[in-house]
Amino acid sequence: MTFPARALLALVLTALPSVALADPFVAELNAADRDYLVTGASMNEGQIRAAYFVQHQSNSALALNLAAQVLRYASPIATDFATYAKNVNVSLPPQPQGDTATALAALKGKTGDDLNAAYVAFVKTQSTAAAALSRREIAIGHQSNIVTLSNLLIMDWTYLNGLAARDQSAMADPTKMGELSPRR
């Protein structure tokens, strides 16, 4: 998310006294809100772990640049999820779960050009799924702060998806390498 949006989000989080986050606040949390926090955090953790893996295993400038951008966006997102989860007493998984864990395991079995292509596809798939999860939260979520978070995170995940789509095109045809301006 953009710096002003992240600053506003931080202000909202710090302005809420801990008393306001007691039982009445938690009671407003519905299954969609809880699922969004747990699944979104898991997907984001998968993005972080995949980016670190690629940074240590790849020699492709394209994949390394994408990994750096993913870390630039995913690290603050992890903090956002942790903050919200703590405020509503939701435990987040320490490792990626479900489809994200499966995709991450498959990625770790690749090397060379196969790794680079698989990583770009992983980022594109995970970012698309995360944005869809955020849209779902906006539609059916109950806790307004978590719905606000999902609105803001759609921008980050959509941007990462655009980077991955650009890199997929560049891998197929280097003359198609385009520029996406940085959002931060």
Image (cartoon, grey):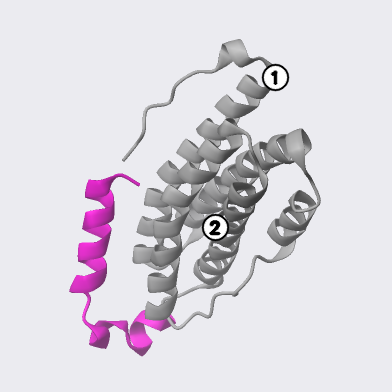
In what quadrant of the picture does the C terminus appear? Answer: top left
Q: Is residue 9 magenta?
A: yes
Residue 52 to residue 88: above or below: above
Q: CA distance from mark 1 to mark 2?
A: 27 Å
Residue in the image at 72% along x and 61% along y? 101
Q: Which residues are magenta?
A: 1-27
Q: Secondary structure at mark 1?
A: helix
User: Residue 147 falls in which quadrant of the image?
Assistant: bottom left
Circles 1, 2 touching at the beta carbon (< 8 Å): no
Name the one closer to the observer, 53 or 173. 53
Give x and y (percent) for residue 21.
Answer: 31, 82
Q: Is residue 82 magenta?
A: no
Residue at which label 2 appears = 44
Q: Residues within 10 Å of mark 1 (few under 14, many from 20)?
A: few
Looking at the image, residue 4 sits to the left or right of residue 56; the answer is left
Residue 28 to residue 109: above or below: below
Residue in the image at 54% along x and 75% along y? 92
Give x and y (percent) for residue 73.
Answer: 43, 49
Looking at the image, residue 109 sits to the left or right of residue 21; the answer is right
Amino acid type at image mark 1: Ala
Give x and y (percent) for residue 14.
Answer: 22, 72
Label placed on residue 140? none
- Most prominent secondary structure in the magenta stretch? helix
User: Residue 121 falls in which quadrant of the image?
Assistant: top right
Tell me which numbered mark, 1 or 2, is placed earlier along the sequence: 2
Name the one closer to the observer, 119 or 142. 119
Amino acid type at image mark 2: Asn
Residue at which label 1 appears = 172
Residue in the image at 63% along x and 21% along y? 169
